[in-house]
Image (spheres, grey):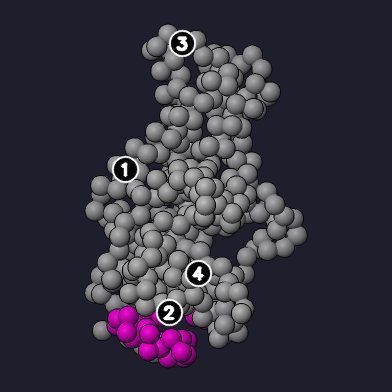
């Protein structure tokens, strides 16, 4: 039996993005209840040469995933907006990306280091900036910050709905990998937890950053102290991010392949615990959106490999309308009007 292609995904605003080797799709539920589908052929920019090698592929995958994920989020946001709101969003997109990056660096890199330093002073512990124990304290605070941040945003209604779509994405991928018909009932029966989840990757990144910080800080910043040493340590941790991402990617691939059953499953538990925060049980309408994205991405792998594509999203009045158009997705769907 021919092996099914690997398809991964991401939750977006009121929708799901799915990426296959040859296809990329984003399905979104619009405010009027209709479905908007953006689907296109996909060819990785890094699917060649050194970028396919271990460690290098981790950095390439992260960069590409961030780029694709931002575009998918932008599309999903546009489907919820009026034309005036879309124009305002277009003018502020790049600025928002820069602000989000700086916020993430401040929250997950600078703040844990600041908390570790402040705790040491409060408790009268003379941490050396490059001491291994100080690096582990930073790592502990980093895990705490991630936990508190995810818990806090999960209380927001809009984010909670996105976490439901995250659960729908995982359930649909499980059904696809189990070679089950993609029906709402089959998808609903699956788990919301998946070993290749981005949340698990984030936790692996934290663990790897603790170890690399303990190794490289004393090697590259011997005798660092004071304000200059504090800034130097912060810059080192930022500079190590590509290395951390590369190692984390390989570790997650290994655990997802070899640790899904038996006693080795214990290595997946930390990521699964955090996925309990970032995934929620979806309703049937959210599952329908995830199935739409999956079916469109899979269609590009088979019948749609050589099909043309349009920049305009395909519109369906409901999930049943999409299912009816699926056998000949492009020709039938292009003229479908949401009502």
Left-right relation of 284 to 42? left
Residues under labels 3 and 2: Cα distance? 59 Å
Left-right relation of 183 to 271? left
What residue would you read off at disc 4? 177
Q: Residue at x 38, y 61 (%)?
A: 191
Residues under labels 3 and 4: Cα distance? 51 Å
Q: Circle 1: is it few (<14), some (14-19), or many (20+) Cα within 10 Å?
A: some
Q: Earlier in the sequence, mark 3 or mark 2?
A: 3
Q: Is residue 297 above or below residue 308?
A: above
What residue would you read off at disc 1? 151
What residue would you read off at disc 2? 181
Residues under labels 1 and 3: Cα distance? 30 Å
Q: Earlier in the sequence, mark 2 or mark 1?
A: 1
Q: Give the prevailing secondary structure in the magenta stretch.
A: helix
Residues under labels 4 and 1: Cα distance? 30 Å
Numbered circle sitting on residue 65? none
What residue would you read off at disc 3? 125
Which secondary structure lies at badge 1?
A: helix
Q: Is residue 162 above or below residue 227?
A: below
**Which quarter of the image is occupied by the N terminus?**
bottom right
Q: Circle 2: is it few (<14), some (14-19), or many (20+) Cα within 10 Å?
A: few
Q: Circle 4: is it few (<14), some (14-19), or many (20+) Cα within 10 Å?
A: some
Q: Residue at x 57, y 25 (%)?
A: 233
Front: mark 2 or 1: 2
């Amino acid at each position: 039996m021919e092996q099914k292609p690997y398809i991964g995904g991401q939750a977006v605003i009121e929708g799901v993005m799915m990426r296959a080797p040859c296809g990329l799709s984003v399905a979104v539920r619009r405010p009027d209840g209709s479905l908007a589908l953006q689907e296109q052929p996909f060819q990785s920019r890094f699917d060649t040469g050194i970028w396919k090698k271990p460690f290098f592929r981790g950095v390439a995958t992260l960069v590409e995933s961030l780029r694709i994920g931002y575009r998918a989020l932008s599309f999903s946001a546009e489907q919820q907006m009026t034309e005036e709101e879309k124009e305002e969003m277009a003018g502020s997109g790049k600025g928002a990306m820069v602000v989000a990056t700086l916020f993430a660096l401040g929250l997950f890199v600078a703040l844990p280091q600041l908390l570790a330093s402040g705790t040491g002073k409060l408790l009268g512990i003379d941490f050396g900036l490059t001491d291994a124990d100080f690096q582990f304290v930073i790592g502990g605070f980093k895990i705490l910050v991630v936990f508190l941040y995810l818990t806090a945003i999960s209380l927001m209604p809009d984010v909670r709905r996105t976490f439901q779509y995250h659960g729908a994405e995982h359930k649909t991928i499980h059904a696809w990998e189990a070679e089950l018909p993609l029906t709402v009932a089959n998808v609903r029966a699956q788990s919301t937890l998946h070993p290749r989840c981005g949340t698990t990757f984030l936790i692996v990144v934290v663990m790897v950053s603790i170890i690399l910080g303990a190794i490289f800080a004393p090697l590259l910043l011997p005798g660092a102290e004071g304000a200059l040493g504090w800034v130097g340590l912060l810059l080192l941790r930022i500079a190590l991010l590509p290395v951390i991402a590369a190692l984390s990617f390989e570790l997650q691939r290994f655990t997802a392949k070899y640790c899904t059953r038996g006693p080795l499953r214990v290595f997946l538990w930390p990521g699964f615990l955090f996925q309990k925060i970032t995934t929620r049980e979806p309703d049937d309408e959210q599952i329908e959106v995830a199935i739409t994205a999956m079916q469109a991405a899979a269609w590009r792998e088979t019948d749609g490999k050589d099909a043309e594509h349009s920049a305009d999203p395909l519109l369906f009045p409901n999930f049943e309308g999409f299912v009816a158009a699926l056998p000949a997705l492009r020709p039938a769907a292009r003229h479908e009007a949401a009502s």
